[in-house]
């Protein structure tokens, strides 16, 4: 069998870092780990090829025609590209299989596909493969029970164009014990975390190392510390492997804020090579956190917890949401003040989105508060929720939050605050490579010489230098990432929000200007301290 695995393209989002990628010399952030795992589940004598549309690989009609079957996987946000490929396959008479989170959540929208793999693939894909070979494949293959990930094979990293990606992905665990109302992880993976064995994970990392990749590895676990006992078993082995092999990797993952309450676990992570953690902060409002059942964020002082992670050597990224039922008109100022005070440079602020198969989606469906017309999956464009805040107020407030947080001066002020409390872990210190120097050169040229925010950039670099050369690598990384956030907020999100505001009119607040505030707005008091 000849199988063509196709990963659909993504629209531009806060997460895509597309304005940063040219600075770091890569074409896309992450390859599709799901398809690489599916590839490993297929019979070893099948002929496989991967086309990743996110890195601009060409998908020609001849490629589609010469495949016995085209397999696609994607998320809701990749829907348009996925359907475009399906339509082409249908016109060319090519058999298709679709799996992944989008197919699992919304199978009814995939009438164009011949076969669907719903849920986790480990048990279904071998069965589908046998049925395809025997010419008796069914339309739907559904996960019967949560698979044991200790038997998941090593993803086929060898199918990748490795040089195209900023990070490479591995996955240690699936599932999360928490109950956040908007999150689909619980329905996709369950609440009881399942983990791979340390040896299994090290084999995956070794496979990546042998292929010659160097850079950042992302543990794509939705909550890396979902099972703290298993993580404590993994980390010493990971640290020892990294020391022994001198693997040129550092690690990035996502974790819940209770990581800050386990300082010895943070130390194990940095000793093993973890450099960055993304934390879902969601809101400065305790009522909104309670509403969305993010109770783990109510147990301490969030700003102090974030600071303690930085002091122990982790660079912290944060996710925030606007539009909860308990958000009042003051939420926008509170959000700006909180984000600045927390010093989270990479603050991805989006509007509440009700993903299918979440408790939030179910509640809003019962309340008649869903907007199927706005179901893009892109929380930085529109919300599919009829929010309690009138839509014009939400859109205008969101615009103000983005224009303030990602004004160059405000962004770099946050980076400075972050660096002040950041203590780099000795395990992550390494000599600069030629590739690092090329990144510095591109950043200096494109941001410092040709950029539209040169003076803010140079002021930031000068202040970072005064904090010592140990912090410079992070400062350069912050500057490079900032290029995406600043450009994306200014050139993509703001015009889109203004267009939506024009559309919905000014009924939310007839006296307010469409552009409710800009970078020139008063800076949050705490940000200046
Ligand atoms: S902690 Fe994260 S992964 Fe877990 S339920 Fe909440 S949002 Fe989802």
Image (cartoon, grey):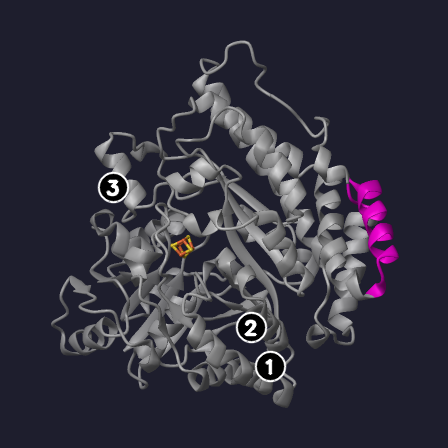
What residue is disc 2 on?
Answer: 162
Q: Position of residue 34 (x, y in %)?
A: 38, 67
Q: Residues within 10 Å of mark 3 (few under 14, many from 20)?
A: some
Q: Comparing marks 3 and 1, which lies closer to the viewer?
A: 3
What residue is disc 3 on?
Answer: 362
Can residue 12 be seen at all in this image of the molecule? no
Residue 279 sits inside the magenta stretch: no
The answer to whether the residue labelled 3 contacts the one labelled 1, judged by CB atoms less than 8 Å apart, is no
Residue 456 sits inside the magenta stretch: yes
What residue is disc 1 on?
Answer: 212
The CA distance from mark 3 to mark 1 is 46 Å
Q: Earlier in the sequence, mark 2 or mark 3?
A: 2
Q: Which residues are magenta?
A: 450-469
User: In the image, is 296 to the left or to the right of 313?
Assistant: left
417 w.r.t. 6: above or below: above
404 w.r.t. 317: above or below: above
Q: Comparing marks 2 and 3, which lies closer to the viewer?
A: 3
The answer to whether the residue labelled 2 contacts the one labelled 1, judged by CB atoms less than 8 Å apart, is yes
Q: Earlier in the sequence, mark 3 or mark 1?
A: 1
Q: Which mark is residue 417?
A: none
Label 1 secondary element: loop
Which quadrant contains ligand 1?
bottom left
Can residue 220 be seen at all in this image of the molecule? yes
User: In the image, is 15 to the left or to the right of 474?
Assistant: left
314 w.r.t. 514: above or below: below
Q: Main secondary structure of the magenta part?
A: helix
The CA distance from mark 2 to mark 1 is 8 Å
Label 3 secondary element: helix
């Amino acid at each position: 069998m000849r199988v063509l695995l196709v990963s659909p393209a993504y629209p531009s989002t806060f997460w895509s870092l597309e304005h940063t990628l040219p600075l770091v010399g890569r074409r896309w952030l992450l390859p599709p780990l799901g398809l690489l795992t599916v590839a490993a589940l297929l019979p070893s004598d099948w002929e496989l090829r991967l086309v990743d549309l996110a890195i601009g690989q060409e998908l020609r009609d001849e490629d589609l025609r010469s495949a016995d079957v085209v397999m696609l996987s994607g998320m809701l946000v990749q829907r348009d590209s996925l359907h475009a490929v399906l339509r082409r396959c249908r016109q060319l008479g090519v058999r298709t299989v679709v799996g992944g989170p989008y197919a699992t959540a919304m199978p009814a929208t995939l009438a164009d596909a011949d076969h669907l793999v719903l849920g986790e693939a480990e048990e279904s894909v071998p069965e589908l493969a046998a049925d395809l070979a025997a010419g008796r494949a069914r339309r739907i293959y559904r996960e019967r029970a949560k698979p044991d990930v200790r038997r998941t094979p090593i993803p086929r990293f060898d199918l990748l164009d490795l040089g195209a990606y900023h990070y490479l992905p591995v996955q240690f665990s699936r599932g999360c014990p928490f109950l956040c109302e908007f999150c689909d992880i619980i329905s996709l993976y369950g609440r009881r975390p399942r983990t791979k064995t340390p040896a299994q994970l090290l084999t995956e990392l070794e496979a990546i190392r042998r292929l010659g990749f160097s850079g950042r590895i992302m543990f794509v676990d939705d909550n890396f510390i979902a099972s703290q006992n298993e993580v404590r078993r993994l980390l010493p082995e990971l640290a020892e492997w990294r020391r022994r092999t001198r693997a040129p990797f550092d690690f990035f993952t996502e974790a819940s804020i209770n990581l800050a309450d386990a300082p010895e676990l943070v130390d194990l992570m940095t000793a093993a090579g973890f450099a960055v953690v993304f934390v879902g902060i969601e809101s400065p409002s305790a009522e909104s956190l309670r509403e969305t059942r993010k109770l783990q964020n109510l147990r301490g002082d969030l700003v102090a917890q974030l600071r303690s992670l930085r002091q122990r050597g982790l660079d912290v990224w944060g996710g925030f949401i606007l539009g909860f039922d308990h958000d009042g008109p003051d939420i926008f100022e509170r959000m700006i003040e909180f984000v600045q005070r927390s010093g989270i440079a990479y603050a991805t602020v989006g509007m509440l989105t009700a993903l299918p198969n979440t408790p939030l989606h179910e509640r809003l469906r019962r309340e008649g508060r869903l907007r199927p017309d706005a179901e893009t999956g892109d929380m930085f464009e529109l919300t599919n929720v009829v929010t309690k805040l009138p839509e014009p107020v939400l859109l205008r407030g969101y615009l103000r939050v983005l224009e303030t947080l990602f004004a160059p001066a405000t962004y770099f002020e946050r980076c400075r605050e972050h660096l002040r409390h950041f203590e780099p872990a000795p395990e992550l210190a390494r000599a600069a490579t030629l590739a690092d120097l090329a990144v510095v050169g591109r950043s200096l040229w494109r941001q410092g010489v040709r950029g539209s925010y040169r003076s803010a950039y140079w002021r930031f670099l000068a202040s970072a230098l005064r904090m010592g050369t140990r912090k410079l690598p992070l400062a350069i990384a912050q500057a490079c990432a900032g290029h995406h956030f600043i450009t994306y907020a200014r050139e993509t999100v703001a015009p889109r929000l203004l267009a939506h505001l024009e559309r919905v009119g000014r009924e939310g607040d007839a006296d307010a200007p469409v552009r409710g505030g800009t970078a020139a707005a008063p800076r949050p008091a705490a940000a200046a301290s």
